């Protein structure tokens, strides 16, 4: 909930009006819903997770590359959610003690000792659930979902009371209109924001088979995703933009982080809300950001890495990535982190969709997916066409990423590459899909591989 909230709230901070921000979030979720439904089809039909599905296109050995890429990104999100949880504990402690906790930052870390301890405390709570398996996680989610809705309504009530109604919030003008601080720059903000919103779900769009594999039918997975993504996320965006717009009215500036906002509030309601959000963040993080990478790490060495050990690896990398560094600014959060990894995951999505629908016509021999020298081994376990398509999809976005991440070191990458990076997910998906489809249709693989893999054309 918190990462989605902050992403939507950042649009207000970047100059959008409430309607513009909500429409941007809704449109992004409608777009990302398409690959989620397409890739989720394989999970529901064959009962296979993402790490196994990618063997169809990348080969039994080559599949480790997209599995690892997806896993590392998920570790980053696991760390970010854990940081948010730690910040909630930090804020909660300040509310209980009656004063804000301070202290100088630790050298090289950039956070103070209490923040670090809060982060590690939240991480330890999550680790307990990892050791006790998904049953404990599912039980936790059952109770937190309705409580989270109550918190949202409570936050709206607070906004209505403090700002004197919703009218003034909805009337907050866009900064892109004539006379605004960013007049004429709407599209310069809209496109990277749209890409970032799509990138937010790009990880789940890939490993959605990890969840749809448990669906009873295709109808269940389609209806479930269609009903559970665009509208709820638009409603969360509406909450985020209303509250963030209210902070402009109440405090004179946009506060995009809900935890920072909570630290300015008082009363027993804040205490209860923070406790509920702490519990909810645990359940969401474990379900959304642990399951996928745990499967992915396990697929790298099934004999040595169990699902639980994969979870341990995820939790460890989540700490080492120092997630607070990614959240220091909206620019770093959106341009460096979210758009950056969308440039990596978009090409994988393009390859999976083309392979499953246009090359294999949704027909997969699941038994062969677990055979090292079988139908999907491509002779040596690697499908070189998929690797070529993946690299080709990533390359156009590298200059723009370097500029966004290290502008002082790469100031002159060219306006064309900056523009391409704005559409990173779209560009990567399109380029990789086209190259993979064309090369596979031409069947440049040796005849011996075609005989071993009748699923290939030719």
Image: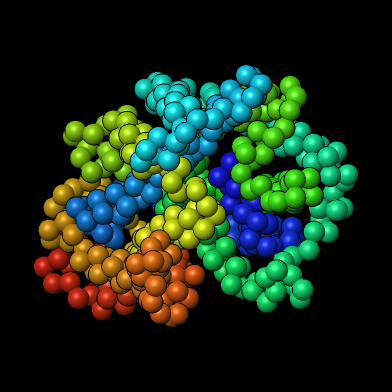
Q: Residue at x 40, y 35 (%)?
A: 106
Q: Quadrant of residue 267?
A: top right
In the displayed structure image, the side of residue 241 where residue 390 appears, left or right: left
In the image shown, does 230 or 450 lie closer to the viewer? 230
In the image shown, does 65 or 87 lie closer to the viewer? 87
Q: Residue at x 70, y 68 (%)?
A: 181
In the image shown, does 400 or 143 lie closer to the viewer? 400
Residue 379 x %, y %: 13, 61
Whether residue 408 is situated above or below residue 252 in the rendered picture: below
Circle count: 0
Residue 440 visible (yes or no): yes
Residue 231 visible (yes or no): no
Q: Quadrant of the N terminus?
A: top right
Residue 150 x %, y %: 73, 31
Q: Quadrant of the C terminus?
A: bottom left
Whether residue 389 is situated above or below residue 211 in the rendered picture: below
Q: Residue at x 41, y 66 (%)?
A: 407
Q: Residue at x 32, y 75 (%)?
A: 435
């Amino acid at each position: 909930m918190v990462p989605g909230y902050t992403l939507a709230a950042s649009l207000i901070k970047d100059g959008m009006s409430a309607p513009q921000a909500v429409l941007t979030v809704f449109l992004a979720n409608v777009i990302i819903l398409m690959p989620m439904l397409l890739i989720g089809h394989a999970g529901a039909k064959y009962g296979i997770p993402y790490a196994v599905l990618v063997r169809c296109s990348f080969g039994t050995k080559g599949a480790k590359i997209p599995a690892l890429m997806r896993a590392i990104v998920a570790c980053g999100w696991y760390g970010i959610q854990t940081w948010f949880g730690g910040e909630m504990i930090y804020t909660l402690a300040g509310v209980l003690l009656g004063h804000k906790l301070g202290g100088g930052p630790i050298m090289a870390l950039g956070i103070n000792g209490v923040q670090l301890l809060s982060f590690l405390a939240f991480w330890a709570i999550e680790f307990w659930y990892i050791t006790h398996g998904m049953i404990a996680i599912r039980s936790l989610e059952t109770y937190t979902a309705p409580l989270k809705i109550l918190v949202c309504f409570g936050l709206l009530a607070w906004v209505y009371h403090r700002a004197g109604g919703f009218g003034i919030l909805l009337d907050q003008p866009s900064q892109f209109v004539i006379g605004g601080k960013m007049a004429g720059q709407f599209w310069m903000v809209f496109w990277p924001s749209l890409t970032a919103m799509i990138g937010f779900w790009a990880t789940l769009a890939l490993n959605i088979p990890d969840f749809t594999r448990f669906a009873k039918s295709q109808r269940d997975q389609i209806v479930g995703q269609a009903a559970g993504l665009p509208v709820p996320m638009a409603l969360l965006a509406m909450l985020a933009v209303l509250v963030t717009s209210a902070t402009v009215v109440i405090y004179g500036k946009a506060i995009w982080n809900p935890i920072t906002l909570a630290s300015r509030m008082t009363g027993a309601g804040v205490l209860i809300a923070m406790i509920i959000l702490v519990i909810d963040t645990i359940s969401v993080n474990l379900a959304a950001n642990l399951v996928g990478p745990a499967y992915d790490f396990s697929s790298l060495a099934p004999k040595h890495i169990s699902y639980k050990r994969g979870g341990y690896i995820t939790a460890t990398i989540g700490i080492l990535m120092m997630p607070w560094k990614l959240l220091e600014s909206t620019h770093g959060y959106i341009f460096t982190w979210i758009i950056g990894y969308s440039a990596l995951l978009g090409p994988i999505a393009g390859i999976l969709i083309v392979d499953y629908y246009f090359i294999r016509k949704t027909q997969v021999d699941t038994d062969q997916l677990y055979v090292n020298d079988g139908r999907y081994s491509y002779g040596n376990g690697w499908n070189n066409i998929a690797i070529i398509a993946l690299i080709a999809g990533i390359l156009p976005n590298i200059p723009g990423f370097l500029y966004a991440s290290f502008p002082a070191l790469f100031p002159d990458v060219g306006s064309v590459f900056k523009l391409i990076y704005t559409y990173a997910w779209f560009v990567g998906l399109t380029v990789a899909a086209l190259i993979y489809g064309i090369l596979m249709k031409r069947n440049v693989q040796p005849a011996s591989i075609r005989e071993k893999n009748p699923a290939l054309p030719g």
